[in-house]
């Protein structure tokens, strides 16, 4: 599947709520821009779509306020601006997978969780610019958080103490 096909979906499937494009490496930002403008998505998986960057995710954030699930793992071009827009545009977001997004930082993460109070699950394994402070921000800012998937060394003793009664799964040894 390429961008042209997904643009057609965005322009013609105005009731589409779930879309999975995992590892469709020919899908570019313009495809998600069309989907963001034309489809009321609740579920989106673009994991491994390495041609997608900020512009596509920003369009989804602005056009899909009912989004509850988003997997953007392995998007090497995704930066904090996309997380900021998701935080502003998708307040119903419950699950997000950010793993292997190397340009995402604690700053973007803090903007995301500031407005996504419904967040229950956040995966951020192999995000080298997310630190223990970012993990602590997720835990402290999201009253409904139940699962945080992150490297064990990024979880401070204080965060472990604070989160032990709230989280069902906190960390993995990586």
Image (cartoon, rainbow, N blue to C red):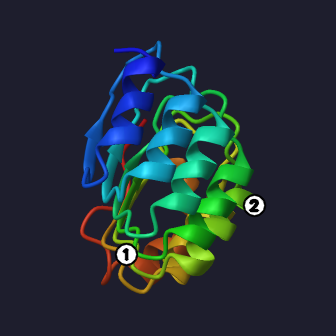
**Kind of element beneath mark 2:** helix
Of mark 2 and mark 1, the one earlier in the sequence is 2
- Quadrant in the picture for the C terminus: top left
User: Residue 100, image x and y in percent?
Assistant: 52, 33
Binning the other alpha carbons within 10 Å of mark 1 as few (below 14), some (14 to 19) or many (20 upward) gives: many
Please name whichever residue, 13 or 132, is drawn nearer the observer in this view of the structure: 13
State which quadrant residue 79 falls in. Answer: top right
Quick check: 35 above or below 142?
Answer: above
Q: Which mark is residue 119?
A: none
- Asked if residue 77 can be seen in this view, the reply is yes
- Mark 1 sits on what residue? 145
The residue located at (28%, 44%) in the rendering is 13
- Asked if residue 136 can be seen in this view, the reply is no
**Kind of element beneath mark 1:** loop
The residue located at (44%, 24%) in the rendering is 48
Quick check: 154 above or below 139?
Answer: above
The residue located at (33%, 40%) in the rendering is 12
State which quadrant residue 161 falls in. Answer: bottom left
Quick check: 2 above or below 132?
Answer: above
User: Residue 81, image x and y in percent?
Assistant: 73, 52
- Mark 2 sits on what residue? 107
Please name whichever residue, 40 or 119, is drawn nearer the observer in this view of the structure: 40
Query: Going by the image, does 168 lie left or right of 171?
Result: left
User: Residue 88, image x and y in percent?
Assistant: 62, 72
User: Residue 59, image x and y in percent?
Assistant: 59, 50
């Amino acid at each position: 599947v390429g961008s042209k096909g997904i643009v057609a979906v965005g322009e013609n499937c105005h009731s589409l709520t779930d879309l999975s494009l995992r590892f469709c490496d020919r899908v570019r930002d313009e495809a998600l821009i069309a989907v963001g403008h034309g489809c009321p998505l609740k579920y989106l998986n673009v994991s491994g779509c390495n041609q997608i960057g900020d512009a596509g995710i920003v369009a989804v954030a602005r056009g899909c306020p009912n989004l509850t699930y988003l997997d953007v793992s392995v998007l090497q071009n995704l930066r904090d601006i996309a997380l900021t827009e998701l935080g502003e545009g998708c307040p119903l977001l419950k699950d997000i997978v950010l793993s292997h997004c190397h340009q995402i930082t604690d700053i973007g993460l803090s903007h995301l969780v500031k407005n996504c109070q419904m967040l229950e699950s956040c995966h951020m394994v192999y995000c080298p610019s997310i630190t223990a402070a970012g993990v602590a921000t997720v835990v402290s800012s999201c009253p409904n958080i139940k699962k945080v998937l992150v490297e064990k060394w990024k979880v401070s003793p204080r965060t472990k103490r604070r989160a032990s009664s709230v989280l069902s799964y906190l960390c993995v040894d990586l």
